[in-house]
Amino acid sequence: MIALFVDKIRFFDTTLRDGEQTPGVSLKPSQKVEIATMLAELGVSTIEAGSAAASEGEREALRLIAGAGLSAEIATFVRALPLDIDYAADCGADCVHLVVPVSDLHIGAKLRKSREQVCEMAWNAVEYAKERGLVVELSGEDASRADPDYLAGLFRGGVERGADRLCFCDTVGILTPEQVASVIPGLLFAPLSIHCHDDLGMAMTNTLAALKAGASAAHVTVNGLGERAGNTPIEELVMALEVLYGVQTGIRTDGLYHVATAVSKMTGVPLPLNKAIVGEMAFTHESGIHAHGVLRNASTYEPIRPEQVGRTRRILLGKHSGTASVQAALHELGYVCDEGQIAEIVARVKAIGDEGRRVTDADLMAVADSVLDLV
Ligand code: KIV
Ligand code: ZN
């Protein structure tokens, strides 16, 4: 069991902000509302609906989502600028995700300001957002390359001025679980979120490490969408927490696949075939040994039941298939065969597979008809 600092983990979903920053992705306001509605139904705590300052379309989406009466907090990304905060408040957001760069690299290269100036900007913006009645999640961009003492000072000052929550961003995905364990405990001046990127394939691992080290919220996206290699995928994190660590996440896991496919369709970003939980092959078996095992007892080769995430199991036929899966497929198609006939059908199925082809139901029926002399 994972030892968590909180009874309940908050899921801050940023599919509609960081996820939409996936190169080439652009959602219409109506699509954003559709996705936000699905996310609220899944049970996420916060939906980051976009960046209110970015465009009129973004503001329209935010207004629509904020006015939709969803059972989630609605947030928008803002810079430490009164204009951005005004947009957020005027569009009806509950919360601002107030982001300032905190590494010297980002402070110098992007803002051309000093550390002190960034503190001033951040703290003034926190006060301004609180005056406008907004929940404030104060985020340190590129926190993993920041001086930890500077970051702690900035965060402490932000909380003193009213920030409700804090967020540590691993902007370029370079954290290790060891660093997470050493840095996170020194930043718990308020409930802390972790925002990880997957540039080195470490987003999930680092997110889990942060939840163990004291963070109480995880920033996630559907299908791991996000800048470059993306963010921590909600479907993977939720299932890992539930299955491996015994955490009751409060997320309706049987809705995960539906949301994943809907988001993939709307964003135009295909799901990799072998993606955990939501990829086409995640609950598909071909090899004879595996299919035989699964047909007898699914736990042999499935760590979770497909129904838990709103899916069904598939057995594919091909050159790796064995008697059990061919027999099961024939049974489903209504064929009754004796042992010799099944052996012949299996041999022909393997021959089709050896040609580099997948065996469809139509192929199997043609083979069975021919072996049973039904043609
Ligand atoms: O990765 C990141 O640092 C971000 C911030 C802008 C919040 O997405
Ligand atoms: Zn990000």
Image (cartoon, rainbow, N blue to C red):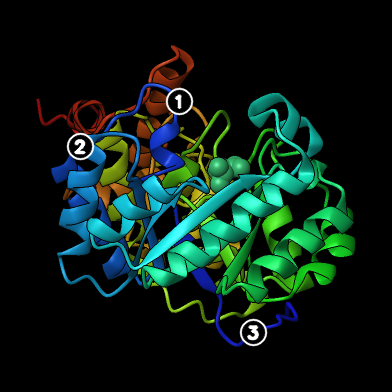
Residue 174 is situated, as x and y percent measured from the top left of the image, at: 77, 39
**Amino acid type for the residue under numbered disc 2:** Gly
> Mark 2 or mark 1: which is in front?
2
The N terminus lies in quadrant: bottom right
Q: In this view, does 309 lie to the left or right of 239?
A: left
Sequence-wise first label, 2 or 3: 3
Local SS, label 1: helix
**Amino acid type for the residue under numbered disc 1:** Lys
In front of the other: 352 or 290: 290
Q: Is residue 105 left or right of residue 30?
A: right
At horizontal 18% and vertical 55% (from top left) the residue drawn is 63
Sequence-wise first label, 2 or 1: 2
Residue 18 is situated, as x and y percent measured from the top left of the image, at: 46, 41
Local SS, label 2: helix
In this view, 199 is above or below 79: above
Sequence-wise first label, 3 or 1: 3
Q: Mark 3 points at which residue?
A: 6
Q: Residue 110 appears in which quarter of the rendering?
A: top right
**Mark 3 neighbour density, 10 Å: few (under 14) some (14–19) many (20 or more):** some
Residue 56 is situated, as x and y percent measured from the top left of the image, at: 21, 36
**Mark 2 neighbour density, 10 Å: few (under 14) some (14–19) many (20 or more):** some
Q: Does the residue labelled 2 lie within 8 Å of ligand 1?
A: no
In front of the other: 218 or 42: 218
Local SS, label 3: loop
Measure how far apart labels 3 and 1 are at the Cα level.
53 Å
Q: Mark 1 points at which residue?
A: 350
- The answer, for residue 37, to whether it is visible in the render is yes
At horizontal 57% and vertical 70% (from top left) the residue drawn is 163
Q: Name the residue under label 2.
A: 57
Mark 2 touches mark 3? (CB < 8 Å)? no
**Amino acid type for the residue under numbered disc 3:** Val
